[in-house]
Image: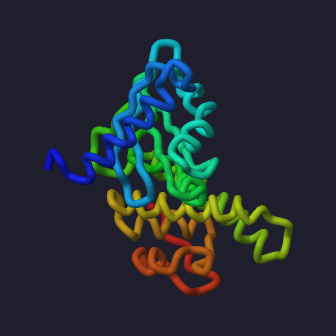
Protein backbone atom coordinates (compact mmCIF):
# COMPACT_ATOMS: atom_id res chain seq x y z
CA UNK A 1 0.00 0.00 0.00
CA UNK A 2 2.81 2.38 0.78
CA UNK A 3 3.97 2.26 -2.85
CA UNK A 4 0.51 2.33 -4.41
CA UNK A 5 -0.26 4.44 -7.46
CA UNK A 6 -2.82 6.33 -5.40
CA UNK A 7 -0.26 7.44 -2.81
CA UNK A 8 2.17 8.36 -5.55
CA UNK A 9 -0.48 10.50 -7.20
CA UNK A 10 -1.23 12.22 -3.90
CA UNK A 11 2.46 12.88 -3.40
CA UNK A 12 2.70 14.33 -6.90
CA UNK A 13 -0.11 16.78 -6.05
CA UNK A 14 1.72 17.77 -2.87
CA UNK A 15 4.97 18.28 -4.80
CA UNK A 16 3.30 20.65 -7.26
CA UNK A 17 1.84 22.58 -4.34
CA UNK A 18 5.23 22.93 -2.69
CA UNK A 19 6.94 24.02 -5.90
CA UNK A 20 4.29 26.24 -7.50
CA UNK A 21 2.04 27.45 -4.70
CA UNK A 22 3.84 27.29 -1.34
CA UNK A 23 7.26 28.48 -2.52
CA UNK A 24 8.62 31.91 -1.71
CA UNK A 25 7.46 33.19 -5.10
CA UNK A 26 4.11 31.38 -4.95
CA UNK A 27 0.71 32.87 -4.07
CA UNK A 28 0.56 31.03 -0.70
CA UNK A 29 4.13 30.86 0.60
CA UNK A 30 4.63 28.49 3.51
CA UNK A 31 1.23 26.82 3.19
CA UNK A 32 0.77 23.04 3.17
CA UNK A 33 -1.61 20.74 1.26
CA UNK A 34 -2.91 17.35 2.39
CA UNK A 35 -4.57 16.06 -0.81
CA UNK A 36 -6.89 13.18 -1.73
CA UNK A 37 -7.68 11.93 -5.23
CA UNK A 38 -11.36 11.97 -6.22
CA UNK A 39 -13.12 10.62 -9.33
CA UNK A 40 -13.66 14.23 -10.48
CA UNK A 41 -10.18 15.54 -9.67
CA UNK A 42 -8.80 16.00 -6.17
CA UNK A 43 -9.49 17.75 -2.88
CA UNK A 44 -7.65 18.43 0.36
CA UNK A 45 -7.05 20.42 3.51
CA UNK A 46 -4.85 23.47 3.17
CA UNK A 47 -2.96 24.64 6.24
CA UNK A 48 -2.25 28.32 5.78
CA UNK A 49 0.81 30.19 6.90
CA UNK A 50 0.71 33.06 9.37
CA UNK A 51 -1.22 36.03 7.97
CA UNK A 52 -3.05 34.02 5.32
CA UNK A 53 -6.84 33.62 5.33
CA UNK A 54 -9.50 31.93 3.22
CA UNK A 55 -9.75 35.05 1.09
CA UNK A 56 -6.06 34.62 0.26
CA UNK A 57 -6.76 31.16 -1.14
CA UNK A 58 -9.77 32.39 -3.11
CA UNK A 59 -7.60 35.08 -4.66
CA UNK A 60 -5.04 32.39 -5.56
CA UNK A 61 -7.62 30.07 -7.19
CA UNK A 62 -6.57 30.99 -10.74
CA UNK A 63 -2.89 30.34 -9.93
CA UNK A 64 -3.78 27.00 -8.31
CA UNK A 65 -5.76 25.91 -11.36
CA UNK A 66 -2.91 26.91 -13.65
CA UNK A 67 -0.32 25.04 -11.55
CA UNK A 68 -2.33 21.82 -11.92
CA UNK A 69 -3.29 22.38 -15.60
CA UNK A 70 -6.94 22.76 -14.68
CA UNK A 71 -9.46 25.17 -16.25
CA UNK A 72 -9.85 28.57 -14.66
CA UNK A 73 -12.90 28.46 -12.40
CA UNK A 74 -12.45 24.79 -11.47
CA UNK A 75 -11.32 25.47 -7.88
CA UNK A 76 -13.80 25.64 -4.97
CA UNK A 77 -12.71 26.89 -1.54
CA UNK A 78 -14.55 26.42 1.75
CA UNK A 79 -13.61 27.94 5.08
CA UNK A 80 -13.06 25.72 8.11
CA UNK A 81 -13.63 26.22 11.83
CA UNK A 82 -9.91 26.83 12.26
CA UNK A 83 -9.01 30.25 10.88
CA UNK A 84 -5.83 29.01 9.28
CA UNK A 85 -7.37 26.06 7.46
CA UNK A 86 -9.50 25.79 4.33
CA UNK A 87 -10.82 22.86 2.34
CA UNK A 88 -10.23 22.92 -1.36
CA UNK A 89 -11.83 21.03 -4.25
CA UNK A 90 -10.07 20.93 -7.62
CA UNK A 91 -12.24 19.67 -10.47
CA UNK A 92 -11.09 18.37 -13.82
CA UNK A 93 -13.80 20.48 -15.46
CA UNK A 94 -15.19 23.94 -14.75
CA UNK A 95 -18.70 22.47 -14.87
CA UNK A 96 -17.78 20.25 -11.92
CA UNK A 97 -17.04 23.31 -9.81
CA UNK A 98 -20.16 25.05 -11.10
CA UNK A 99 -22.29 22.04 -10.11
CA UNK A 100 -20.63 21.95 -6.69
CA UNK A 101 -21.47 25.62 -6.08
CA UNK A 102 -25.10 24.88 -7.00
CA UNK A 103 -25.50 22.39 -4.16
CA UNK A 104 -28.30 23.46 -1.80
CA UNK A 105 -27.01 25.24 1.30
CA UNK A 106 -27.57 25.30 4.15
CA UNK A 107 -28.87 21.80 4.77
CA UNK A 108 -31.51 20.88 7.36
CA UNK A 109 -29.43 19.05 9.94
CA UNK A 110 -31.82 19.62 12.83
CA UNK A 111 -29.77 22.37 14.46
CA UNK A 112 -31.71 25.22 16.03
CA UNK A 113 -28.71 27.50 15.61
CA UNK A 114 -25.68 27.25 13.35
CA UNK A 115 -23.25 27.19 16.29
CA UNK A 116 -25.14 24.72 18.52
CA UNK A 117 -25.18 21.01 17.73
CA UNK A 118 -28.54 19.28 17.82
CA UNK A 119 -29.12 16.95 20.76
CA UNK A 120 -32.24 14.97 19.74
CA UNK A 121 -32.98 12.72 16.79
CA UNK A 122 -36.35 14.35 16.06
CA UNK A 123 -37.42 17.30 13.97
CA UNK A 124 -36.87 20.80 15.34
CA UNK A 125 -39.03 23.88 14.94
CA UNK A 126 -36.22 25.42 12.93
CA UNK A 127 -36.43 22.51 10.48
CA UNK A 128 -40.13 23.09 9.91
CA UNK A 129 -39.83 26.87 9.62
CA UNK A 130 -36.99 26.58 7.12
CA UNK A 131 -38.76 23.97 5.02
CA UNK A 132 -41.91 26.10 4.98
CA UNK A 133 -39.90 29.14 3.86
CA UNK A 134 -38.20 27.15 1.10
CA UNK A 135 -41.52 25.66 -0.04
CA UNK A 136 -43.09 29.13 -0.30
CA UNK A 137 -40.14 30.43 -2.30
CA UNK A 138 -40.36 27.47 -4.68
CA UNK A 139 -44.12 27.96 -5.03
CA UNK A 140 -43.56 31.60 -5.99
CA UNK A 141 -41.10 30.65 -8.75
CA UNK A 142 -43.26 27.73 -9.93
CA UNK A 143 -46.37 29.88 -10.25
CA UNK A 144 -44.43 32.61 -12.07
CA UNK A 145 -43.23 30.14 -14.68
CA UNK A 146 -46.69 28.57 -15.05
CA UNK A 147 -48.21 32.03 -15.54
CA UNK A 148 -45.62 33.01 -18.15
CA UNK A 149 -44.18 35.82 -16.07
CA UNK A 150 -40.51 36.75 -16.24
CA UNK A 151 -38.59 34.39 -14.03
CA UNK A 152 -34.88 33.73 -13.47
CA UNK A 153 -34.55 30.05 -14.38
CA UNK A 154 -31.38 29.74 -12.33
CA UNK A 155 -33.25 31.01 -9.29
CA UNK A 156 -36.05 28.52 -9.98
CA UNK A 157 -33.59 25.62 -10.16
CA UNK A 158 -31.84 26.77 -6.99
CA UNK A 159 -35.12 26.98 -5.07
CA UNK A 160 -36.31 23.63 -6.41
CA UNK A 161 -33.04 21.90 -5.52
CA UNK A 162 -33.00 23.46 -2.06
CA UNK A 163 -36.55 22.30 -1.36
CA UNK A 164 -35.79 18.80 -2.60
CA UNK A 165 -32.73 18.59 -0.33
CA UNK A 166 -34.77 19.88 2.60
CA UNK A 167 -37.47 17.25 2.10
CA UNK A 168 -34.90 14.47 1.76
CA UNK A 169 -33.12 15.55 4.96
CA UNK A 170 -36.21 16.11 7.07
CA UNK A 171 -37.68 12.74 6.08
CA UNK A 172 -34.83 11.09 7.97
CA UNK A 173 -36.33 12.53 11.18
CA UNK A 174 -40.00 13.19 10.42
CA UNK A 175 -42.93 11.08 9.27
CA UNK A 176 -44.05 11.44 5.64
CA UNK A 177 -47.46 12.64 6.86
CA UNK A 178 -45.86 15.56 8.70
CA UNK A 179 -43.99 16.68 5.59
CA UNK A 180 -47.06 16.16 3.39
CA UNK A 181 -49.25 18.33 5.61
CA UNK A 182 -46.64 21.08 5.76
CA UNK A 183 -46.46 21.25 1.96
CA UNK A 184 -50.25 21.12 1.65
CA UNK A 185 -50.56 24.12 3.95
CA UNK A 186 -48.15 26.01 1.72
CA UNK A 187 -50.38 25.07 -1.23
CA UNK A 188 -47.90 23.41 -3.56
CA UNK A 189 -49.21 21.57 -6.62
CA UNK A 190 -48.09 17.98 -6.87
CA UNK A 191 -46.69 18.76 -10.33
CA UNK A 192 -44.26 21.19 -8.72
CA UNK A 193 -42.70 18.46 -6.57
CA UNK A 194 -40.19 15.75 -7.55
CA UNK A 195 -42.29 12.70 -8.43
CA UNK A 196 -40.26 10.28 -6.30
CA UNK A 197 -40.66 12.41 -3.17
CA UNK A 198 -44.32 13.12 -3.88
CA UNK A 199 -44.88 9.37 -4.00
CA UNK A 200 -42.87 8.82 -0.82
CA UNK A 201 -44.95 11.26 1.22
CA UNK A 202 -48.26 10.28 -0.42
CA UNK A 203 -48.91 13.73 -1.90
CA UNK A 204 -52.41 13.99 -3.44
CA UNK A 205 -52.77 14.30 -7.20
CA UNK A 206 -55.87 16.51 -7.06
CA UNK A 207 -55.46 20.12 -8.08
CA UNK A 208 -57.46 21.21 -5.02
CA UNK A 209 -56.29 18.86 -2.23
CA UNK A 210 -58.08 18.51 1.06
CA UNK A 211 -56.75 20.87 3.71
CA UNK A 212 -55.12 18.81 6.49
CA UNK A 213 -56.76 18.75 9.88
CA UNK A 214 -54.91 21.01 12.38
CA UNK A 215 -53.15 19.14 15.17
Residue sitting at the far left: 1
Q: Residue at x 40, y 77 (%)?
A: 200
Q: Residue at x 76, y 77 (%)?
A: 146
Q: Residue at x 48, y 60 (%)?
A: 165
Residue 42 position within the rendered picture, expressed as x and y whole percent measured from the top left = 41, 49
109 or 209, which is in the foreground?
109
208 or 51, which is in the foreground?
51
65 or 184, which is in the foreground?
65
Q: How many numbered marks have been drawn onto this rendered protein structure?
A: 0
* Left/right of residue 15 with respect to residue 79 in the rendered view: left
Vertical placement of residue 77 versus 40, above or below: above
* Left/right of residue 197 with respect to residue 172 in the rendered view: right
Residue 173 position within the rendered picture, expressed as x and y whole percent measured from the top left = 33, 57
Q: The C terminus lies in which quarter of the figure?
A: bottom left
Vertical placement of residue 111 versus 102, above or below: above
Q: How is the image coloured?
A: rainbow
Q: Residue at x 63, y 59 (%)?
A: 158
Say whether residue 136 is visible: yes
Vertical placement of residue 18 versus 174, above or below: above
Say whether residue 81 is visible: no
Residue 95 position within the rendered picture, expressed as x and y whole percent measured from the top left = 59, 60
Residue sitting at the far bottom: 206
Vertical placement of residue 31 versus 156, above or below: above
Residue 155 position within the rendered picture, expressed as x and y whole percent measured from the top left = 70, 59
Amino acid sequence: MEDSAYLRDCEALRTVWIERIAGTDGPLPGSDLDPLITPQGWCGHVLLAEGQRAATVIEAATDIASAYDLPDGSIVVRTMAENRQVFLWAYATKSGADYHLSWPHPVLDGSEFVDIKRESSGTTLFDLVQLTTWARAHKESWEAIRAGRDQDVQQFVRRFTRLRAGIVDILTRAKPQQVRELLLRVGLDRASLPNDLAEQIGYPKDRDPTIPIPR
